[in-house]
Image: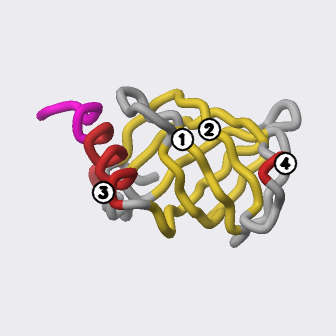
Amino acid sequence: MYWKAEVPERRQYPRVNTTMSIQYRGIRQASDSVMGAIARDISSGGIRVLVNEFVSVFTRLVVEVAVPSTPKAVRVISKVAWIQKRPHGEQYEVGMQFLDMAEEDRQNIAEFVERSTPKQ
């Protein structure tokens, strides 16, 4: 058995638990095929969301995240890094890696994570 102190953190960016609404669609899908989901945590490099449909790993998505205290949703091109079916029901947890976004959106996410990270 490993204790948390023995397992090094592999994440490149600090991650904060949160609940935010997101909308997503396949990068080549029409704007009217948007799906909704709930974010579970976020970092400057990616987001973990709870979705109601299976999404294949490596799928590229257009994601809009309603980051608190930003005037408009942050728009990000992301890639599905992993997916895991929840034990009960028909939902999936999906880890998305951020690939491309406007500098202003990157800054808005970084500031939100910084404000939300517990100070030690």
Whether tag 1 and tag 2 are in contact, CB under 8 A, the answer is yes
Q: CA distance from mark 1 to mark 2?
A: 5 Å
Which mark is first along the chain, 4 or 3? 3
Label placed on residue 22:
2
Three-letter residue code for mark 1: Val
Q: Residue 116 location in percent, x, y?
A: 29, 31
Taking the image as shown, residue 22 lies to the left or right of residue 26, namely left
Real-space CA distance between mark 3 and mark 4, rounded to the nearest whole angstrom: 44 Å
Give the residue type that dot 2 points to.
Ile
Disc 3: which residue? 6
For mark 1, does the 10 Å Cα neighbourhood hold few (<14), some (14 to 19), or many (20 or more) residues? many
Please give the residue where the numbered disc 4 appears in the rendered image. 33
Magenta highlight range? 114-120
Callout 3: few (<14), some (14-19), or many (20+) C-alpha neighbours within 10 Å?
A: few
Q: Earlier in the sequence, mark 4 or mark 2?
A: 2
Q: Residue at x 65, y 57 (%)?
A: 62
